[in-house]
Image (cartoon, rainbow, N blue to C red):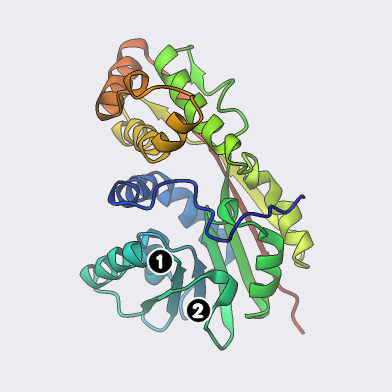
């Protein structure tokens, strides 16, 4: 796998309130598959877990419930604004076993061992995923868990919509092409296998699950539209569409209406899970 040379904070989507909202909508879609990853990986009560790229705190909230009051979750997030949202949500949920560190994961000011290190949709934004994972896995105790999830978006511009639909097809093309133009790997999910090996970890177990969106699923239509909103500056910059083409403020509703009227089935990005355990010394 070829490592990228961009800066560590190479986040392609906007760091703005609208992006914070999009992350929470996305989290609703991903919650079941992330819960399955944690269950299969063996994350449970009493564990001390390090989470990379906490965003608005959704994964940390799932972990907090899973490790229980005797466990601990430490989330790392580079965006100072969104981490305040995460802290507020944790307080409102009543969890006392979660804390967040506002830091670049390239220079973590943390000490001690963790029972697990996890992350969701973080490696796609890092210039050197394998090098980062190798370094951070040193913080995991022998026999500990490494578990990550990433998207595989290779089908976006070809088979994402059935039957074919112009609006939905355009939206998926805008999203996929915007990521491609900034050099982010559309197949990061499938690259997880090599990332683990290059990091010096045992070969991971892997599972792929498709995100299926229909007209009866307003969250899915909203997520597509909000992802387009966050990528809109790139879509306009690269000339993929005009603001008039996108009509961002009505995109979610137009997409939902067409999905209902035409019985559309839309395949969002596949979610690829990978997990392994470090050898016992």
Residue 206, compared with residue 118, is above or below; it is: above
Nearest the viewer among 180 and 76 is 180
Question: Is label 2 in a helix, a strand or a loop?
Answer: loop
**In the rendered image, the vertical position of residue 155 relative to residue 27, given as above or below:** above
Q: x, y percentage for residue 140?
A: 63, 78
Q: Earlier in the sequence, mark 2 or mark 1?
A: 2
Q: Which residue lies furthest to the bottom in this view?
A: 112
Q: In the figure, is residue 53 to the left or right of 128?
A: left
- Give the total of numbered labels: 2
The percent coordinates of residue 135 (x first, y second) are 68, 74
Q: In this view, does 116 lie above or below 15?
A: below
Question: Which residue is pictured at 55% across the width and 88% down the height?
Answer: 111
Determine the image quadrant of residue 142.
Answer: bottom right
Other-residue count near label 1 (Cα within 10 Å), few / some / many at <14 / 14–19 / ≥20: many
Tell me the residue that label 2 is attached to: 47
Percent x, y for residue 12? 49, 46
Which residue is tagged 1?
60
Residue placed at 62% from the left, 54% from the top?
Answer: 6
Disc 2 versus disc 1: nearer the observer: 1
User: Is 153 left, or right, of 264 in this rendering?
Assistant: right
What residue is at 34 percent from the left and 62 percent from the top?
A: 82
**The C terminus, quarter of image:** bottom right
Q: In the image, residue 118 lies at what x, y percent? A: 55, 65
Q: How far apart are marks 2 and 1 (CA)?
A: 13 Å
Question: Is 75 situated left or right of 176 in this image?
Answer: left
The residue under the point 52% across, 83% down is 109
Q: Please, what secondary structure does the residue beneath circle 1 have?
A: helix
Q: How crowded is mark 2: few (under 14 residues within 10 Å), some or many (20 or more)?
A: many
């Amino acid at each position: 796998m070829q490592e990228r040379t961009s800066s560590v904070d190479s986040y392609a989507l906007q760091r703005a309130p609208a992006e914070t909202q999009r992350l929470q909508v996305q989290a609703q879609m991903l919650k079941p598959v992330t819960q399955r990853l944690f269950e299969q990986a063996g994350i449970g009560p009493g564990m001390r877990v390090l989470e990379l790229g906490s965003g608005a705190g959704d994964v940390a909230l799932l972990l907090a419930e899973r490790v229980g009051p005797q466990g601990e979750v430490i989330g790392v997030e580079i965006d100072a604004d969104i981490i305040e949202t995460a802290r507020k949500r944790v307080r409102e949920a009543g969890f006392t076993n979660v804390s967040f560190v506002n830091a670049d994961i390239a220079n973590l000011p943390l000490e001690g061992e963790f029972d697990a290190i996890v992350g969701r949709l973080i490696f796609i934004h890092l210039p050197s995923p394998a090098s980062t994972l190798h370094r951070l896995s040193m913080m995991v105790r022998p026999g500990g868990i490494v578990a990550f999830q990433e998207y595989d978006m290779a089908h976006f511009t070809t088979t994402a919509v059935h039957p074919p639909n112009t609006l939905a097809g355009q939206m998926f093309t805008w999203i996929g092409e915007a990521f491609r133009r900034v050099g982010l790997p559309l197949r990061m999910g499938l690259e997880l296998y090599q990332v683990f090996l290059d990091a010096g970890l045992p070969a991971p177990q892997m599972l792929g699950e498709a995100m299926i969106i229909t007209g009866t699923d307003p969250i899915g239509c909203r997520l597509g539209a909000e992802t387009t909103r966050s990528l809109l500056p790139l879509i306009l910059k690269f000339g993929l569409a005009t603001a008039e083409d996108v009509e961002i403020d009505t995109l979610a509703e137009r997409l939902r209406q067409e999905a209902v009227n035409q019985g559309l089935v839309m395949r969002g990005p596949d979610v690829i899970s990978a997990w392994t355990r470090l050898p016992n010394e």
